[in-house]
Image (tube, rainbow, N blue to C red):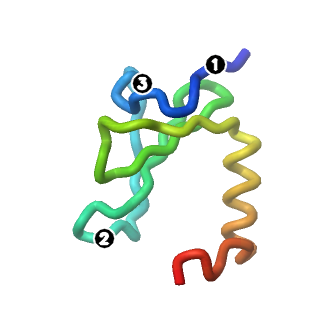
Amino acid sequence: MTNHYDNGINAMDFEGVVWRKARASDAYNNCVEIARVAEDAVALRNSRFPEGPALVFTRAEIDAFLAGARGGEFDGMTV
């Protein structure tokens, strides 16, 4: 069973998780970090504010997002 986490939880409240940052992150730490926080839950946080809020998604939601990103569905969002 998946633990329930509210979105906006303080990222530092997750004990024993490993946050991963993309190698594409720039020198100013402008990146999103991701951590598995439960068997079926993944959290995202802003690397510039590691103690700030985290958004929590199911693995299925993250899989769908990554598939969309790989497929170019979000191209142009930062232009």
Q: How busy is the neighbourhood of tag 2: few (under 14 within 10 Å), some, or many (20 plus)?
A: few
Q: Residue 45, image x and y in percent?
A: 43, 45
Toward the viewer: 27 or 79?
79
Residue at image point 76% right, 42% down: 60
Residue at 30%, 46% (x, y): give it.
49
| Label 3–label 2 contact, CB within 8 A | no
* Mark before the other along the chain sequence, 3 or 2: 3
The answer to which of 3 and 23 lies nearer the viewer is: 3
| Residue located farthest toward the left when viewing the structure as drawn | 27
Q: Residue at x 63, y 17 (%)?
A: 3
Q: Mark 3 points at which residue?
A: 14
- Residue type indicated by callout 1: His
Q: Quadrant of the N terminus?
A: top right
Q: In this view, does 76 lie above or below 57?
A: below
Whether 15 is drawn above or below 33: the answer is above
Which of the labelled discs sits on residue 26, or is there none?
Answer: 2
